[in-house]
Image (cartoon, helix red, strand yellow):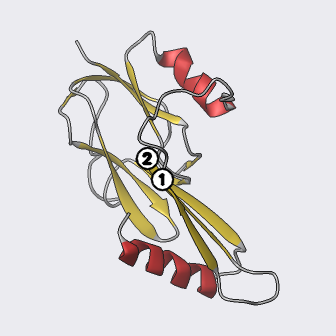
Amino acid sequence: MDIRKVKKLIELLEESGIAEIEIHEDKESVRISRGSSGAAPQTTINVPPIDAGVSANKQISPSESKADDYSDEGEVITAPMVGIFYTSPSPDQPPFVNKGQNIKTGEVLCIIEAMKIMNQIESDVNGKLIRVLVENGDPVEYGQPLFVIDPS
């Protein structure tokens, strides 16, 4: 994760009344929390071990089990962070993608706004978009299913 992004998150945390925020991006996560004594925010960056195999003690969250509900239909694209889901770059522009459209790897599917930062979410598979699971402007949680893409 880019150190400039981390610094920007710290600035946004200081300006807001939020006590703590955690952001997940790919295999990295950042948790920034404001000290209760008014001390400067502490930043922790956790990078998972190289062996990213499934642990025997791993608990499945409700959002992960929801993704399995659609896995029989195709590849499920989930939210990599908490934020607000947007289908287009601005309200007066068309959506990035539509149901039935052929999608290529790296193509922008949507935007998730997190702390006033617009994050483009790209497809990691080729295929046909068969479901959009979230409405424009809805809040989304980390790991929440957003799209189902048929890779065939």
Q: Which residue: 53% across, 84% down?
A: 11
Q: How many marks?
A: 2
Q: Which residue: 46% across, 61% down?
A: 113
Specify whether 117 is left or right of 120: right
Specify whether 122 is left or right of 86: left
Task: Reply above or below: 53 against 26.
Answer: above
Badge 1 density bin: few <14, some 14–19, many ≥20, Cα 10 Å? few
Mark number for residue 27? Answer: 2
The amino acid sitting under disc 2 is Lys
The amino acid sitting under disc 1 is Val
Task: Reply above or below: 41 against 72.
Answer: below
Q: Which residue: 21% across, 42% down?
A: 107
Near-viewer residue (114 or 87): 114
The reply to whether discs 2 and 1 touch (Cβ–Cβ < 8 Å) is: yes
Query: Where's residue 10, x and y in %?
Result: 54, 80
Query: Where's residue 94, x and y in %?
Result: 26, 49
Near-viewer residue (2 or 112): 2
Q: Which residue: 52% across, 69% down?
A: 115
Give the residue at the far right of this rendering: 37
Give the Cα separation between the discs numbered 2 and 1.
Answer: 7 Å
Specify whether 73 is left or right of 149: right
Q: Quadrant of the N terminus?
A: bottom left
Looking at the rendering, which quadrant does residue 149 occupy? top left
Q: Earlier in the sequence, mark 2 or mark 1?
A: 2
Looking at the rendering, which quadrant does residue 109 occupy? top left
Q: Secondary structure at mark 1?
A: loop
Q: Secondary structure at mark 2?
A: loop
Badge 2 density bin: few <14, some 14–19, many ≥20, Cα 10 Å? few
Query: Where's residue 25, x and y in %?
Result: 43, 53
Query: Where's residue 152, x and y in %?
Result: 22, 12
For mark 1, what is the residue? 47
